[in-house]
Amino acid sequence: MFRRIFSIAANTFRETIRNKILYAILAFALFVIGMTFFLADLSVGDFARIIADVGLASIHIFGVIMAVFLGINLVSNEVDRKTIYIILSKPVRRFEFIFGKTFGLSVTLLLTTLAMATVLFLVHLSYRYGGRAEVGIFIASAGIYMELVLLTCLASLFSTFTTPVLSAIFTLSLFLVGHLTKYLYVLGEQSKAVGVRWGSRFLFYILPNLENFNWKNEVAYGGLKSFSILGWAAGYLVAYAACVLCLSCLLFARKDFK
Amino acid sequence: MMHERPILAIEGLSKSYPTGFWRKPVRVLSDLSCEVRENEIVGFLGPNGAGKTTTIKILNRLAFPDAGKVTLFGGRVRDGADVRRRIGFMPEQPYFYEYLTGGEFLRLCGQLCGMSPSKTESRSLELLAKVGLSMARGTAIRKYSKGMMQRLGLAQALLHDPELVILDEPMSGLDPMGRMEVRGIIRDLKAAGKTVFFSSHILSDVEALCDRVIMLHKGRKVAEGRVEELIGAETLYIELVVSPGLSADRLAAAEIPPEAGFAQGALLVLRAPDSGQANRWIAGLLREGCTVLSCVPVKKNLEEIFMERIENPSATGAAS
Ligand SMILES: Nc1ncnc2c1ncn2[C@@H]1O[C@H](COP(=O)(O)OP(=O)(O)OP(=O)(O)O)[C@@H](O)[C@H]1O
Ligand SMILES: [Mg+2]
């Protein structure tokens, strides 16, 4: 089982790194991150702030673009191109296929995130008014990466039952909502109606809370207080991703292919 | 060795596809039952849209039936991965990962089938040679032609040395040489004790290769049986070749209507409707001093039987 998942993951990794559009997005992202080098000259104030606001935000945004772009096509491409016929006619179970595809893409995203973080790290290191090795960039990027993995799982969930365009819309909506669930909860609690309060609590717990992976500000303003936040986020990621993947497998298990 | 239970048994298979939100679903397969026995080559025939591909997809669990049951290997093998490992499948118009080379794709298939890397390597070399793709091993599949894809599809289906090989239109898109090669490969499979079930539109191939055929029309079985039985059941006419050719009055003297014959060079060809008539004609011809060079019953070919059964499916003489 693990060998087959690994083979599918390795093949997915190979597929994504041979994707020219991914390289285009990555090249553009690295260019933008590299440009923060000059941005520091233009702005007044604290350089750390620039990293937080522009550098990490770029990694975040471009990472999301890559995750969504690759994630929505992850399963639907194979179904449309009928390559899945041959894979599933081998002794491969459908859940192994879903897990393998998702793991493969996660590895690709790990590399792209690492590449972007490294460039930002180098920009910071070579900053002409006193550069230094800011490890916090990698810590913040780890959070971004966890978020990307979760978005990948969501995108592939949608792509098991709907078109790429709709999958992209759903995933991006969840991305936006996922950063705002806190406000949803707060607003809900202010309501006088019991139904609204319970409804908003329900949504708060069921929707992905992507702010759990966001410690950009802590990193930018003097570092993380404790690393337990990372562990907590990783646990949340594993639990939530497992639920999403299981749901995908369930939806995929008895699907008829055209 | 003959097993009492067939290697593939289909019972009462039905399948509908939804057509739209309000309209009623379209029936693609209705109560299809048939079987494939060990070490047979079985042809699966039917016009476009008959439901062949749908049936084959169900066999490979790419689609699920509304009703009915598929039993593979007589239920002897635990369902799931073990069954899949014993089946080779080539889809209709196979499509592969374009970013891989032929060799890389077969390596992936070997991994998924749980084969060792060295076994995969030797098998893929052997099979690529067999399907005539040795030179394209390192070429990206993106650059393959249609026929090359078809050949690679056959190679991946046979890679893990399956007992049952299911092929959806293995000859389509191949040049005459390729068709000959595929025929040879299918025969070799039978010789090696394997079972082959394939769909095709090329009836001459089916006639030449298959032990039995199953004919499908609009999702229903219209005929099933051994090729000889389906063909043998119906004799069109008996053809006599006579030398030398006869003039019209000598034909009349032999009690043969002139419209029954035509000249072919120096010879006369006669078509007798049945064997009694043929014998009476032969007697007359001998009296007239002619030599009967040959006397052959001409049977319908598969093509004619196919057309007939489709036009008149009620005459389902499922000889089996
Ligand atoms: N996914 C689908 N959704 C709706 N209808 C379908 C679907 N797949 C097949 N059909 C219908 O089912 C019928 C049978 O299709 P199938 O592909 O099994 O035919 P076939 O016998 O393989 O034909 P061909 O010789 O052209 O390959 C057709 O009428 C087709 O329109
Ligand atoms: Mg077909």
Image: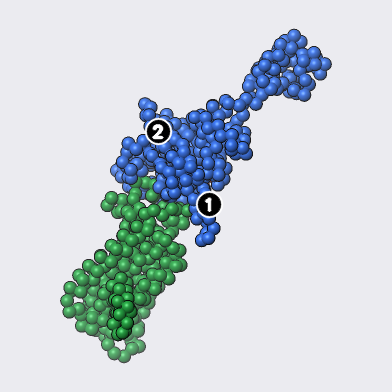
Chain colours: A green, B blue
**Amino acid carrying mark 2 in the image:** Pro
How far is the residue under mark 1 from the one under mark 2? 30 Å
User: Dot 2: what SS?
Assistant: loop
Amino acid type, residue under disc 1 in the picture: Val
Residue B277, quarter of the rendered image = top right
Q: Give whichever of A165, B25 is nearer the camera.
A: B25
Report if the beta carbon of the residue with label 1 is closer than 8 angstroms to ligand 1: yes
At x 20%, y 70%, the residue is A231
Chain assignment, label 2: B
Q: Quadrant of residue A221?
A: bottom left
* Residue B64 badge: none
> Where, by quadrant of the figure, is residue B265 drawn?
top right
- Residue at 50% in and 55% down: B18
In the rendered view, would you say A26 is above or below B131? below
Query: Which residue reaches farthest right?
Result: B249
Q: Secondary structure at mark 1?
A: strand
Q: Is residue A246 visible?
A: yes
Circle 2 packing at 10 Å, graded few (<14), some (14-19), many (20+), is: some
**Quadrant in the picture for the N terminus of chain B:** top left
Residue position for label 2: B6
Residue at 80% x, 16% y is B252
Across and down, in percent, residue B102 comes to 42, 48
Residue positioned 36% across, 36% down in the render: B73
**Do the dots labelled 1 and 2 sit on one chain?**
yes
Q: Which mark sits nearer the N-terminus, 1 or 2?
A: 2
Q: Which residue is mark 1?
A: B26
